[in-house]
Amino acid sequence: MKILHWFIPFAVLMLLLSVGAIAVSGAGTSPVGAPYVDNGLHVAGADATDWYRFEYPGNHSQVTIRLVDVDEGMGFEVYPPTLMDEWWKHDGIGAGSVQGNDLIWTGNAHEAGTWYIKVLNNNPAPTSYRLLVTGSDVAFSPAVASITSLSPTTPSLENVDPNNAFLADATARVIPANTTLWYRYFYPGDHSQMNIVLPKGSENKLSFNVHAPSQMSTWWNDTPIGRGNVSGDDLKWSGNSHEGGWWYVEVANDRDTATAFNLDVTGDKVWMTNPTDSAATPPTVPSITPTLANADPNKALVVNEDLHTIPGTTTLWYRFAYPGKNDQTILTVPDGNKNGLRVHIHTPEEMKNWWNATPIGQATPKGDDLVWNGGSPENGWWYIEVINENTTPENYQLLLQTQERY
């Protein structure tokens, strides 16, 4: 490894930056939005962390990651997809080892999906570096059209059911389009102050509701105890109560694009873990049949003609095999218009980034029903997104026909 003498390289670096000789890092400062590895020259800020990603099929083919000719104080760690839901709690499964003037990691795995690299600059000044990733089956663009496990740029939808509410611990998150996510915190009911802030929530057109423990037995029909109020660009709520236990915050995104956010819950007697042993586990919150398992497109149910129930302010997903060849497909949702539902149709290509893509079709009113018909040369699994913006559950059916074209 090179010995870094700061007073000369730093002056040289500033000169190069002033004339554009070195490309300032285009890396992500967190996994959310991290770019694909481009094998180019970058500059890490002082005491900074840069993030990159690449696609790997999980076929045990060899991958080599190299930081070329780096200075002391530089390093990197490697993260597989399964660590990324809570990456901040984990070290990578591997790190760069010194080989000459380079740092190198080589490995293989059975785990497919988006892999991440965290590049660390522990020096007190900006440092240039080149990150190289090689392997016969490594890719630097989105993976196949079929939906794979969700990465940080495709946020997990596990907490659309309040029974799976995440702790409201101010972690940076992303909420998909037309989605409601749930969070919880513990409050002892001693009339101490609770404060909830959604920074830039008003600017980003988000909203949130606050539910006391006693409301959660019928949360879908009860008026929440509080709502986020506009305060400049933010949304805020403050309150106190005699009611102790697990309190819930419902964050909603009614826009057609995914949005990043932080949820800040503070107070002298607010805990993200229960301070007592007697109520360490959150209570079971009654959910509406059916379960919300298919609120995640990765768990979309195959279309059938059964009668379904969708909870209030919820999106559910279904899929069907489409042969392509511009065959005509007709989707009917009886009473869908009458019941205030919305239905979107997505192609396999759109599902690569469904949270930002415009769907190929939307069911339109036909009397009380909703109807969509269309065709395309694109075959594979097509997806149907059923959206209920009402605060009450609704029943519905999906009636699907495909007519072959000759």
Image: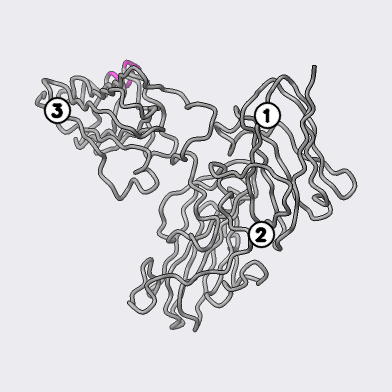
Depth check: give the residue in front, 112 or 306.
Answer: 306
- The alpha-carbon separation of the residues under discs 2 and 3 comes to 63 Å
Residue highlighted by disc 3: 7
Q: Position of residue 24 (x, y in %)?
A: 35, 25
Residue name at image x 65 percent, y 72 percent: 222
Looking at the image, is mark 2 or mark 1 nearer the viewer? Answer: 1
Q: Amino acid at mark 1?
A: Tyr
Per the image, label 1 sits on a secondary structure element best described as strand
Taking the view exactly as shown, the residue that stands out farthest to the right is 367
Residue 18 lies within the magenta run: yes
- Give the dominant element type of the magenta stretch: helix, strand or loop: helix
Above or below, 158 against 346 in this view is below
Image quadrant where one finds the N terminus: top left
Residue 347 lies within the magenta run: no
Residue highlighted by disc 1: 322
Apparent side of residue 125 relative to residue 247 in the rendered image (left or right)? left
- The alpha-carbon separation of the residues under discs 1 and 3 comes to 64 Å
- The alpha-carbon separation of the residues under discs 2 and 1 comes to 28 Å
Q: Could you tell me if the residues under marks 2 and 1 are in contact, i.e. CB atoms within 8 Å?
A: no
Residue extent of the magenta highlight: 16-21
- How dense is the environment of label 2, judged by Cα within 10 Å: few (below 14), some, or many (20 and up)? many
Depth check: give the residue in front, 199 or 217.
Answer: 217
Residue highlighted by disc 2: 311
Counting residues from the start of the chain, the first of labels 1 and 3 encountered is 3
Depth check: give the residue in front, 392 or 197.
Answer: 392
Q: Amino acid at mark 3?
A: Phe
Per the image, label 2 sits on a secondary structure element best described as loop
Q: Position of residue 54 (x, y in %)?
A: 38, 27
Q: Position of residue 203 (x, y in %)?
A: 58, 49
Looking at the image, is mark 2 or mark 3 nearer the viewer? Answer: 2
Apparent side of residue 216 relative to residue 392 in the rendered image (left or right)? left
